[in-house]
Image: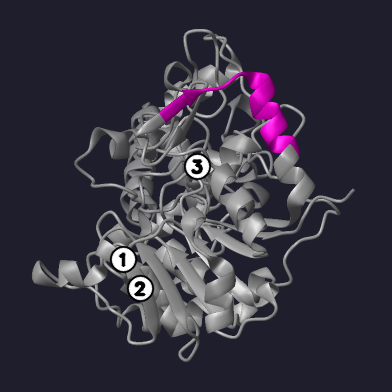
Amino acid sequence: MPTTNKMLEGSFSARRSPRAAEKGVSGEFDGSDEFADESKTRKQVSVAARVTNYLIRTGFIWPVLIMGIAIVIISSLVIYSRDLVCISASSSAHISRLFVGFDGLESDFGSLGVPWCRSKHGATVEWTSQDLIEGLEEFVPIYETRPIKNNMYGMGFDHSFGLWFITRWLKPDLMIESGAFKGHSTWVLRQAMPDTPIVSLSPRHPEKYLKKGPAYVDGNCTYFAGKDFLDFGSMDWGRVMKKHRIEDQSRVLVFFDDHQNELKRLKQALKAGFKHLVFEDNYDTGTGDHYSFRQICDQFYVRGGGHSCFKDSDEARIRSRRKKFWEKAVDAEELCGPGEEWWGVRGYMRDDFNHSNKAITYNEHFQNSRFVESVLDVYWELPPVAGPSLTHQTRYDPARVPGPIVEDGRYGLFQRVGLSRLESSVFNGYTQMVYLRVSEPET
């Protein structure tokens, strides 16, 4: 999407080229040469040049130029602001964006670094960006039939698509979810695999929410919920595998949306023999209610990792500016603890919806990342489905996330895959959902 400056340059260049202006000046008559070659002069001087000459002689050229520039600027703002709006036109942030441009605010995905967990052998996922685009086109009509239209505090569109796409691609023989809330994620899993059994663990049974509004309860799902609830780490997974006749646990997909320390969940999954894991809330450094892989892999030796707590650093200045525009952006004061502890959340490893908050040293944080790398075969963060100028989202800061599937400015594609039919509020829940394929450390 062009910036405001480029828009103005395009508008200015359309008025009159420098060469035309030079011709207008050279067409003026001066002194003894006034009638030297009158016929040639008249043939070369255009109507525009004659008007310019007249305005120069009469002294009206500057008022006319100023008025013309003002008209061009106002027209550019009116025309292009329709496509650039990301928040209500009445807000001060929106007005600021129109004048400062969008290159430094929206389309600079990853400009503050995107720490990426390194896998053992550098492997990546099989699917491509084209697969994701085709998946979006297929998923939007499915999403429009969701039973829970307003899934506040639950998954929005981005992560719903991510879970559906990964599940459908892997085609597991058993799906496990830890954290069901009202049942939206259960519904998404069911859309991806209509006949595959689901095991759902949740402190409160989704059916309890039916008394207050929409919820989803699946007929082919074994619930360990309510009075029958068991935590993921307390389950006898061998018994569950035997019940569902699963002999190869690489045929199982585990989805975590339980706001628990992700390092803890990784170790529990490895112990149970699971290989394919999806974590819904992969919070960025300095945010969230639990220790995440994004936080763990935010290290100085990783490209895009590590932070400066110096208040006059470039990073601090950039973060301070972005905080004005993005709700979830973190400035240096929020990022760093009193002793310049930036890892985790101000030097703390959060767990269990932030009910547990343990301080860790940088060395402990570093060792955690080394362990994660030792078991990772694949690490892949779901990109946002589309850029902010298209989705009108104002929460996550693009400077800390990978580039979107549908880039800013590609409204035709945004419309073609059906995303333009959705309300902007469904795009506000992006928190770097991540897919992991893991195995035991190599000896």
Secondary structure of the residue carrying tag 2 is strand
Q: Which residue is mark 3?
A: 261
Q: Residues within 10 Å of mark 3 (few under 14, many from 20)?
A: many
**Hey, which quadrant is residue 299 in on the image?**
top right
Residue displayed at 75% across by 44% down: 373
> Is 367 colored magenta in this rendering?
yes
Dot 3 or dot 2, earlier in sequence: 2
Q: Which residue is mark 2?
A: 223
> Alpha carbon of mark 1 to alpha carbon of mark 2: how far?
8 Å
What are the residue bounds of the magenta stretch?
A: 357-370
Check the image and name the residue furthest to the left: 211
Residue displayed at 52% across by 54% down: 1
246 to 368, vertically: above or below: below
- x, y percentage for residue 60? 35, 30
Mark drawn on residue 228: 1
* In this rendering, the label closer to the viewer, 1 or 3: 1
- x, y percentage for residue 118? 76, 46
Report the amino acid beneath label 2.
Answer: Tyr
> Alpha carbon of mark 3 to alpha carbon of mark 2: how far?
22 Å
Query: Relative to 407, is 179 on the left or the right?
Result: left
Q: What secondary structure characterizes most of the magenta part?
A: helix
